Image (cartoon, grey):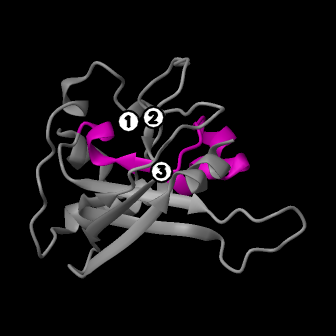
Amino acid sequence: MSAIERITKASHLIDMKDIIREGNPTLRAVAEEVTFPLSDQDIILGEKMMQFLKHSQDPVMAEKLGLRGGVGLAAPQLDISKRIIAVLVPNITEEGETPQEAYDLQAVMYNPKIVSHSVQDAALGEGEGCLSVDRTVPGYVIRHARVTVDYFDKDGEKASHQAKRLQLHRCTT
């Protein structure tokens, strides 16, 4: 049974055993674009990836399922070479403030593509992690301070989002 067949079964919850680790060639390969209209399997995969992120950010579910926290999960991390990513960035406010929305960004992106980026770079002072890397990697990871991503939602509607590096910094510490 293929990874996508196993993961999209109704009874399956994505957990850390489903996430492939560094060194697996799927992580370095160029993922295949998905075609529209999406297959039911691709829609279910996106929904299950988002469910994983929600569980990973919920302390009770994360402990119960043995999950590491994450704000993003890409299909290749599940050994599925498709251009599908789920992103769930909590809306973090100053202490004492109540956010109007629970999430700053909640999206399953099909065929995402970075279309622009800032000239300025940034790095997180506390470092960063990856669900596919089980070890601590010392040093700074230099990335663009802002990127704009164009993508399609599950209905084939084009969307765009600009992400700032500091948004991700605040939800991973």
Q: Which amino acid type is marked by label 3?
A: Ala
Residue 145's disc is: 3
In the image, which residues are magenta?
Answer: 53-79
Residue 142's disc is: 2
Tell me: 126 left or right of 70.
Answer: right
Viewer-side label of 1, 2: 2
What crowding class fits label 2: few (fewer than 14 Cα within 10 Å), some (14-19), or many (20 or more)?
Answer: few
Q: Which amino acid type is marked by label 1?
A: Asp
Q: Answer yes or no: is residue 137 visible.
A: yes
Q: Which amino acid type is marked by label 2?
A: Ile
Secondary structure, mark 1, is: helix
How far separated are the C-alphas under marks 1 and 2?
Answer: 28 Å
Residue 7 % position (x, y): 31, 47
Label 1 or label 2, whichever comes before in sequence order: 1
- List the residue tagged with mark 1: 18
Q: Nearer the viewer, residue 132 or 170?
A: 170
Instruction: Please give the count of numbered marks on the rendered protein.
Output: 3
